[in-house]
């Protein structure tokens, strides 16, 4: 194991409009390395494999335990979280690229704020009356909790959107994560109040009809969120509401 | 009269709780955060949130919660605000419940509660193993609702640099930097609320998130805010050592029967599973036969330190001991501990059901922070603070699951008080001068860094800072070492002047932002080291072998540090603690209290 090294190839770009280029780094191997710890090592010694001085890599991170959703990038071509990507489990050279479907900020950092905008469009919240002391919330059975909790663990990382063949500028598709949140709030006893509005927001262009059920989303989701199940349930509800609206007209 | 404008800095639980209250009162809020608020450190909290709802027929009450908190904090917390917090906690849980937090439930559909350290009651509500994430999301969703109504404006990827103070040293707004364009800008406000979380990065690696540097608190301390009880740093006994961070391994692993041990032979390189029972040393069980592996956090931590550093018995000579679950049935482990075992599997690559985990104590939480009064106001008019960045609720040691409640409660108190203050504020008579001056000051600081031609790499300097502080300023403290630590910090501040940025570009330059934070970390580190030096007693998380007892006569006092700009160093004052409700008594966990 001694003297083993790790080769990392990084696709860099200095700003949103400049051209991209690749740089290669070589680090001494040690146990437990992950992609973020490697990027930290590069920052402390920003020299490329061929000895050229360069700048530290710009990337997003915060929790370093796969719960904040910051550090999403393409690692050997796959959309995943960098903090939980152990170097020992990756084929070398390790290839790091920014997400391809979001505007690049710099290097590996991309602007993924669209997911937060989408959450606004579908009103992903429980419409409470106010924060005054109004007593306990509605009773919820353990079974209902066990349905809701897994979806509520979505970390808004956008891996599912990067991997989705339907998610691009042309379709304007909201993506799997947002649809799953609709499923979450539409089944909450108080969240239900906004059910119709949420489903309406998912009708038409960019809505749930764009989904081709390719299931790429489920495969990359780091939190194993039951995305296809949520999509088909919400899809059914949207359909039902659309037909209902048709007759009501 | 125009609606008051409040700026909230930080979108963790404390910041978001404040924002919601302010928006509800009809004031306008600008919310600043380095990371998108949904990615704040609060998402890391696993265990749960305390409230004496007494849903288990145990006769729990808010008074007992209050007593546990004060006692756990070794009587250093001012008691009236702690009492108010404990009384508000059940209502806070109800509110979170109404917001849709998927708390675990009893068969009847009521909230379930579990037991945590430092209490005899089932008082901790939880949502799986990701309670902090679930609470933060609930508040984040409500803030997004206000945002879509135009009542809240978010500035994400913006970093607070300093407060704008007028000639009377009243806060009039903030100076902040766009972390993408690197633009420095000032923003006027009638009051500001600091909710910037912990300061783990001062210790290099900790259980905290990357942006928990304490930089904002330090900047304000350097502008004249008092910083209180900085020396009280909580170290969690069981963390997973990593190259980049120390990941928490929850107390529940020991609660379910996990045993801590090291090989009896120093430097034993054998696979742990092949080491026979009689060659293993279960030191906690030997030293504390009554509580065994479940001694309180500070005691377990000190024992591990002793084994590793004094007896040199760490695994393979390294600072690590085993936390062993392999004797427990796999099915039981999966049912009760799956979430946390997954973290170990994911980040270490080994299955803790098959092989003992390697763990070591890690810096976890700061009890100290910005000094505030009972209305969450700092000593500078117009600056309020809430959450881990302030010092009010935990005294010398925080109980598990009490932080989340103190963050939300503090935010809910700070918000309305800031609005009230803002409504009574006189307009600034003389225009923009103070804003321009502050902006220029911060821009100059940036260009100084950009143009500096030195030899020091800021990231390496930071690694040194972390090692220094972890070694002498955490678990076991000696005056001689603390003195040396402070001298080294002075030396490092000197070296900081020769810092050299390898990145001099004007776009999304993380080196500039980080180097600024590093300076603030160095300044705050001195407050921690000197505060520890001065407190010649042992209390809560602060332990000096040369002064092993609590000394109420001399040190039942809040440490208040303030910055002396001319001397470029901290000065100290001590303030009486308000112990008007529960008379101090000795803190002993080997007997019922
Ligand atoms: C691993 C772990 C587990 C824990 N588990 C529990 C638990 O089970 N129960 C419990 O009660 N407590 C727990 N804690 C403690 C608790 O999580 C924290 O104390 C709490 O979340 C802090 O919340 P906060 O709102 O004060 O700050 P944070 O959530 O840290 O938020 C800080 C905010 O400030 C922003 N910010 C910081 N600096 C600046 C700046 N200069 N400019 C602009 N924005 C800035 C950040 O972007 C962020 O939005 C745990 C802590 C850790 C580390
Ligand atoms: S199922 Fe396929 S098309 Fe639908 S959201 Fe997932 S990846 Fe996209
Ligand atoms: S659904 Fe999964 S992949 Fe998509 S944003 Fe949420 S956590 Fe990420
Ligand atoms: S840093 Fe938070 S998910 Fe990776």
Image (cartoon, rainbow, N blue to C red):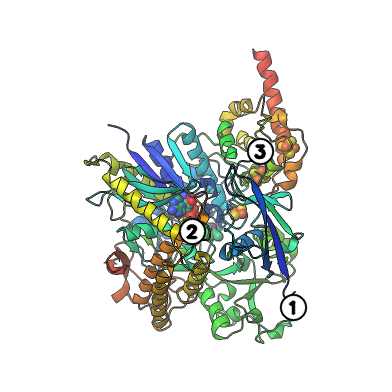
Circle number at residue A180? 3
Image coords of residue B114 (percent x, y): 56, 57
In the rendered image of this protein, does residue B353 appear above or below residue B321? above
For marks 1 and 2 on the same chain, the one whose residue lies earlier in the sequence? 1
Q: Which residue is mark 1?
A: B271
Q: How far is the residue under mark 3 from the one under mark 1?
A: 45 Å
Kindly identify which chain the residue marked by label 3 belongs to.
A
Count the marks: how many?
3
Left or right placement of residue B113 versus residue B535 in this view: right
Q: How far is the residue under mark 3 from the one under mark 2?
A: 36 Å
Circle number at residue B314? none
For this orientation, the residue located farthest to the top is A249
- Cβ–Cβ below 8 Å for labels 1 and 2? no
What crowding class fits label 2: few (fewer than 14 Cα within 10 Å), some (14-19), or many (20 or more)? some
Tell me the SS state at disc 1: loop
Callouts 3 and 2 in the same chain: no
Residue B123 seen in the figure = no
Tell me the SS state at disc 3: helix
Kindly identify which chain the residue marked by label 1 belongs to.
B
Q: Residue at x 45, y 63 (%)?
A: B518
Name the quarter where the C terminus of chain B is drawn.
bottom left
Nearer the observer, disc 1 or disc 2?
2
């Amino acid at each position: 194991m001694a003297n083993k090294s790790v080769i990392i190839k990084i696709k860099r770009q200095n700003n949103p409009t400049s051209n991209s280029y690749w740089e290669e780094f070589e680090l001494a191997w040690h146990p437990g390395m992950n992609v973020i710890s490697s990027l930290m090592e590069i920052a402390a010694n920003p020299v490329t494999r061929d000895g050229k001085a360069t700048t530290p890599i710009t990337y997003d991170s915060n929790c370093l335990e796969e719960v904040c959703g910051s550090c999403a990038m393409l690692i050997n071509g796959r959309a995943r979280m960098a903090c939980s990507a152990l170097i020992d489990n990756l084929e070398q050279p390790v290839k790091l690229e920014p997400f391809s479907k979001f505007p690049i900020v710099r290097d590996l950092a991309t602007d993924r704020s669209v997911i937060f905008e989408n959450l606004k469009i579908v009103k992903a919240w429980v419409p409470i009356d106010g924060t005054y002391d109004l007593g306990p919330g509605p009773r919820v059975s353990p079974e209902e909790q066990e349905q809701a909790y897994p979806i509520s663990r979505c970390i808004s990382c956008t891996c599912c959107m990067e991997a989705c063949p339907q998610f691009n500028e042309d379709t304007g598709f909201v993506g799997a994560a947002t649809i799953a949140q609709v499923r979450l709030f539409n089944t909450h006893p108080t969240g239900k109040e906004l059910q119709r509005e949420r489903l309406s927001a998912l009708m038409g262009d960019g809505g749930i009809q764009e989904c081709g059920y390719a299931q790429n989303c489920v495969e990359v989701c780091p939190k194993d969120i039951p995305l296809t199940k949520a999509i088909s349930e919400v899809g059914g509800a949207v359909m039902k509401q659309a037909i209902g609206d048709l007759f009501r007209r | 009269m125009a609606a008051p404008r409040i700026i909230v800095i930080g979108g963790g639980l404390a910041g978001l709780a404040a924002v919601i209250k302010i928006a509800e009162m009809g004031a306008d809020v600008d919310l600043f955060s380095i990371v998108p608020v949904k990615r704040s450190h609060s998402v890391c909290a696993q265990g749960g949130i305390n409230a004496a709802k007494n849903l288990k027929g145990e006769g729990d009450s808010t008074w007992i919660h209050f007593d546990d908190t004060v006692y756990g904090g070794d009587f250093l917390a001012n008691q009236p605000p702690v009492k108010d917090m404990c009384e508000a906690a059940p209502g806070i849980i109800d509110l979170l419940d109404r917001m849709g937090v998927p708390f675990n439930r009893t068969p009847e559909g009521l909230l379930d509660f579990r037991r945590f350290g430092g209490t005899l009651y089932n008082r901790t509500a939880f949502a799986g193993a990701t309670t902090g994430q679930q609470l933060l999301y609930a508040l984040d969703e409500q803030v997004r609702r206000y945002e879509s109504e135009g009542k809240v404006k978010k500035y994400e990827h913006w970093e607070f640099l300093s407060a704008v103070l007028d000639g009377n040293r009243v806060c009039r707004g903030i100076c902040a930097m766009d972390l993408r364009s690197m633009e420095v800008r000032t923003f006027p406000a009638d009051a500001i609320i600091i909710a910037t979380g912990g300061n783990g990065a001062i210790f290099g690696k900790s259980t905290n998130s990357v942006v928990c540097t304490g930089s904002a608190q330090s900047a304000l301390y350097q502008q004249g805010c008092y910083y209180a009880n900085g020396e009280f740093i909580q170290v969690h006994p069981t963390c997973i050592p990593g190259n980049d961070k120390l990941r928490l391994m929850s107390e529940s692993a020991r609660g379910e029967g996990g045993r801590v041990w090291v090989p009896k032979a120093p430097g034993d390189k054998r696979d742990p599973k092949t080491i026979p029972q009689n060659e293993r040393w279960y030191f906690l069980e030997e030293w504390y036969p009554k509580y065994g592996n479940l001694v309180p956090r500070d005691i377990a931590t000190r024992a591990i330190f002793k084994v590793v550093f004094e007896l040199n018995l760490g695994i393979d000579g390294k600072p690590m001991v085993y936390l062993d679950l392999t004797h427990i049935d796999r099915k039981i482990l999966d049912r009760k501990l799956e979430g946390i075992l997954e973290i170990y599997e994911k980040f270490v690559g080994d299955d803790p059901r098959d092989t003992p985990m390697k763990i070591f104590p890690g810096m976890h939480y700061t009890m100290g922070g910005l000094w505030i009064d009972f209305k969450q106001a700092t000593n500078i008019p117009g600056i309020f603070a809430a959450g881990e960045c302030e010092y009010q609720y935990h005294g010398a040691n925080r109980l598990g699951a009490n932080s989340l409640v103190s963050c939300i409660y503090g935010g809910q108190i700070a918000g309305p008080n800031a609005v009230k203050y803002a409504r009574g504020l006189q307009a600034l008579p003389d225009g923009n001068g103070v804003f321009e001056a502050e902006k220029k000051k911060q821009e100059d600081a940036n260009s100084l860094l950009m143009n500096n031609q030195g030899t020091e790499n800021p990231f390496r300097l930071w690694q040194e800072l972390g090692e220094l502080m972890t070694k002498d300023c955490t678990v076991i403290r000696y005056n001689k070492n603390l003195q040396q630590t402070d001298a080294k910090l002075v030396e490092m501040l000197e070296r900081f002047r020769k810092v050299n940025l390898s990145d001099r570009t004007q776009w999304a330059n993380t080196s500039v932002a980080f180097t600024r934070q590093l300076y603030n970390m160095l300044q705050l580190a001195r407050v921690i080291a000197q505060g520890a030096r001065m407190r010649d007693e042992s209390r809560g998380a602060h332990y000096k072998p040369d002064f092993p007892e609590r000394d109420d006569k001399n040190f039942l006092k809040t440490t208040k540090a303030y910055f002396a700009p001319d001397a470029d160093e901290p000065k100290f004052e001590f303030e009486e603690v308000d112990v008007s409700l529960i008379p101090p008594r000795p803190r002993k966990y080997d007997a019922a209290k």
